[in-house]
Amino acid sequence: VQLQASGGGLVQPGESLRLSCTASGRTGRNVLMGWFRQAPGKEREFVTAITWSDGFQYYEYSADSAKGRFTISADSAKNTVHLQMNNLKPEDTGVYYCAAKSRYNRGAYYQPYQFDLWGQGTLVTVSS
């Protein structure tokens, strides 16, 4: 399975951006995909993730920093997740990585080492 992320760019504070990530190849019955970000000089941090089973039963969870402004959604038929980011702030600047956990069964995962599939990263810059 490979992950392909897209949608980064340069925006001004208060604007919105939508990231997408598609998993190619065969995924399992249960799927966990999510987003991390890494600001310059900082460690990679969890943003949000979504799980689904048998193509439905979606469950999403987010870091406190993402709640209220970021929304994750998924199209299970396309193995694609989207990250809608609204009211962006300069501190949201960083490289955003799509991630997935192979052989996922259940539960919520937050640490980078718990995800073994990674996309190439897409740069989000929020600046006036």
Image: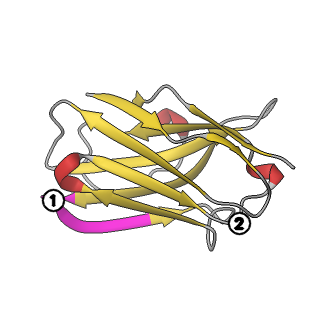
Q: Which residues are magenta?
A: 53-60
Q: Residue at x 16, y 42 (%)?
A: 28
Q: Determine the residue located farthest toward the bottom in the rendered image.
A: 68
Q: Which mark is residue 87?
A: 2
Which quarter of the rendering shows the N terminus?
top left
From the top left corner, tell me how far across and down residue 124 is, in percent.
67, 41
Question: Looking at this view, is 122 or 128 the one in front?
Answer: 128
State whether the magenta stretch is mostly helix, strand or loop.
strand
Where does label 1 land, which residue? Answer: 55
Left of 65 or right of it: where is 51?
left
| Residue located farthest toward the right when viewing the structure as drawn | 128
Nearer to us: label 2 or label 1: 2
Horizontal side of 125 relative to 114 (left or right) equals right
> Splitting the image into 4 quarters, where does residue 63 fall?
bottom right
Residue 43, disc? none
In the picture provided, is 23 more to the left or to the right than 127? left
Q: In the picture, residue 118 is in which quadrant?
A: top left
